[in-house]
Image: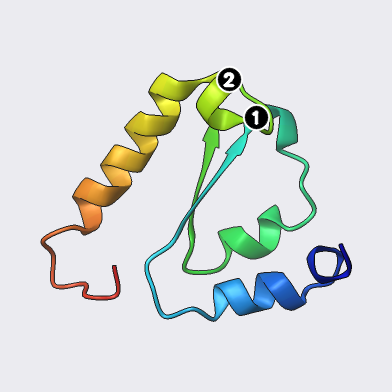
Amino acid sequence: MRESDSDRLLDESLGMPVTRLFLYGEANRTLSYLPKLRVSEVEVNEVPQSAHFLFYDNPAETFEMVGRFVAKHSGSSDRRC
């Protein structure tokens, strides 16, 4: 809990040299770290009609977003993916 409550875990994630996607449910749109993610290189998307368990609450939209992300970054010259 100490790790996730500090900015250390978030900073480590932001420092990773890979293409990243962060999905969150619309019920969690007030997460304190979303502004920091949005100004980073992380692609951030809100899954409608969902809360913490995106794959359970709205699996179709969750998989659609993941699929678009993968399609966008696969086969490109971006080798960080």
Question: Mark 1 highlights which residue?
Answer: 26
Q: Secondary structure at mark 1?
A: helix
* Secondary structure state at the residue bearing disc 2: helix
Quadrant location of residue 35? bottom right
Q: In the rendered view, tell whether residue 21 sits above or below residue 6.
A: above
Q: Estimate the x, y position of residue 45 in percent, counting from the top left.
A: 50, 42
Q: Residue furthest front?
A: 1
Q: Circles 1 and 2: CB distance less than 8 Å?
A: no
Quarter of the image where the N terminus is located = bottom right
Q: Position of residue 12 (x, y in %)?
A: 62, 79
* Residue at 81% over, 71% down: 3
Graded by Cα atoms within 10 Å as few (under 14), some (14 to 19) or many (20 or more), the crowding at tag 2 reads some
- Gap in angstroms between the C-alphas marked 1 and 2: 11 Å
**For the point 75% across and 78% down, which residue is it?**
8
Number of numbered discs:
2
Task: List the residue tagged with mark 2.
Answer: 57
Spot occupied by residue 26 in the image (x, y as percentages of width and height) = 65, 29
Amino acid residing under circle 2? Asp
Report the front residue among 37 and 17: 17
Q: Earlier in the sequence, mark 1 or mark 2?
A: 1
Quadrant containing the C terminus is: bottom left
Mark 1 crowdedness (10 Å alpha carbons): few <14, some 14-19, many ≥20: some
Q: State whether residue 1 appears in this view.
A: yes
Kindly indicate the quadrant of the structure image that contains residue 14: bottom right
Residue 17 vertical position relative to residue 35 in the rendered view, above or below: below
Q: Amino acid at mark 1?
A: Glu
Residue in front for this viewpoint, 17 or 46 = 17
